[in-house]
Image (tube, rainbow, N blue to C red):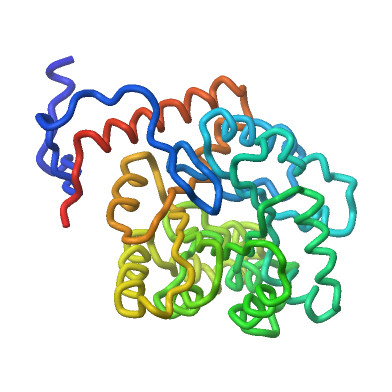
């Protein structure tokens, strides 16, 4: 084992200083903190997934259950399928599972918001949030995905304008996220000037929905639009943009909470990015939870338990390079 454990200098994670002398091993639980108006026990978030799969109820139930046990927040997958039809409502009805003390958010795409505003059916969205007893709505903004998707919707209004109209009409909290390609500095600036509950990055480096749609497209479209799948903003870049905006435009910034997601491989990524960000934040993952949530619950529980232990260890002995 000693021979097999040799490491090269290039293997070192250079993001951190390792300080082994300054603290004992962590014991007990992490310190609870306020996020989205509720109290979370760990800085982790289950990012939106499972909009309409056959396993949606099992996956969502397992995720909501593990959130309750560890004190995490959760975003549901796209709720479009139950917007005006309750056939699959129980696949998304997770408030009885997660409990009332933790954040739980419904989710719809920007195209559904645009259409509801045009058709004067925004009341259906309000009713959806109320039926789910959700704390608010996540709007996923996905123009690249919609354009490439064979049956995708076409946006006729700039998403930022639709979001502003939604906020004016909504009597619930609103979070805005991308779906795997992140957002550049001007989009973040525009969002941070709005009274949003939070911004979720969904940055480049994780599940890429433009690439997923290319897999479903014909060969000609795939070859033509494939370069779009390489476009995006990674989470560390987005942390830098947010820090600059928060510093330069402090008086104009109304949204001051962030869910860092997209390409977060483990608790070290989450700890590093939260430590670098100047605003209150949690880190979110989707596919990492999905792999465990579709199987046995004990497997999911063990995965989250080790994430929490890893984050606590990092908090005790690692500081980041500024």
In this picture, residue 24 sits left or right of residue 53: left
Q: Is residue 100 above or below residue 233?
A: above
In this picture, residue 319 sits left or right of residue 278: left
How many numbered marks have been drawn onto this rendered protein structure?
Answer: 0
Counting from the top left corner in percent of width and height, residue 229 is at 49, 65
Which image quadrant is residue 6 in? top left
Q: Quadrant of the C terminus?
A: bottom left
Q: Quadrant of the N terminus?
A: top left
Q: Is residue 35 above or below residue 25?
A: below
Question: Which one is in front, 259 or 12?
Answer: 259
Question: Which one is in front, 255 or 208?
Answer: 255
Counting from the top left corner in percent of width and height, residue 75 is at 61, 49
Q: Residue at x 63, y 79 (%)?
A: 164
Which image quadrant is residue 205 in? bottom left
Counting from the top left corner in percent of width and height, residue 263 is at 42, 51
Q: Residue at x 54, y 22 (%)?
A: 299
Counting from the top left corner in percent of width and height, residue 175 is at 58, 62
Which image quadrant is residue 260 in? bottom left
Q: Residue at x 58, y 38 (%)?
A: 290
Q: Is residue 116 above or below residue 217?
A: below
In the picture as drawn, the residue positioned furthest to the top comes out as 1
Q: Is residue 131 above or below residue 311?
A: below
Q: Residue at x 67, y 70 (%)?
A: 110
Question: Which one is in front, 25 or 155?
Answer: 25
């Amino acid at each position: 084992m000693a021979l097999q454990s040799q490491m090269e200098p290039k293997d070192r994670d250079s993001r951190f200083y390792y300080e082994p002398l300054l603290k004992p091993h962590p014991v007990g639980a992490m310190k609870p903190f306020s996020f989205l108006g509720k109290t979370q026990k760990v800085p982790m978030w289950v990012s939106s997934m499972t909009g309409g799969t056959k396993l949606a109820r099992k996956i969502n139930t397992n995720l909501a259950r593990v959130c309750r046990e560890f004190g995490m927040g959760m975003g549901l997958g796209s709720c479009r399928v139950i917007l005006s039809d309750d056939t699959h409502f129980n696949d998304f009805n997770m408030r009885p599972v997660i409990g009332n003390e933790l954040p739980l958010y419904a989710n719809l795409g920007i195209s559904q918001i645009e259409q509801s505003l045009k058709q004067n059916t925004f009341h259906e969205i309000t009713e959806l949030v109320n039926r789910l007893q959700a704390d608010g709505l996540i709007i996923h903004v996905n123009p690249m995905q919609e354009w490439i998707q064979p049956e995708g919707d076409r946006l006729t209004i700039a998403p930022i304008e639709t979001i502003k109209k939604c906020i004016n009409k909504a009597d619930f909290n609103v979070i805005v996220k991308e779906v795997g390609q992140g957002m550049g500095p001007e989009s973040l600036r525009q969002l941070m000037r709005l009274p949003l509950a939070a911004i979720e990055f969904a940055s480049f480096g994780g599940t890429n929905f433009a690439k997923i749609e290319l897999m479903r497209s014909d060969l000609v479209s795939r070859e033509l639009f494939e370069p779009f799948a390489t476009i995006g903003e990674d989470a560390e870049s987005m942390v830098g943009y947010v820090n600059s905006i928060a510093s330069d435009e402090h008086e104009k910034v109304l949204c001051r909470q962030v869910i860092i997601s997209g390409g977060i491989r483990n608790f070290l990524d989450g700890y590093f990015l939260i430590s670098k960000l100047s605003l209150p934040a949690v880190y979110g993952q989707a596919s990492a939870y999905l792999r465990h949530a579709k199987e046995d619950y004990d497997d999911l529980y063990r995965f989250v338990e080790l994430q929490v232990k890893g984050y606590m260890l990092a908090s005790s002995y690692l500081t980041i390079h500024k």
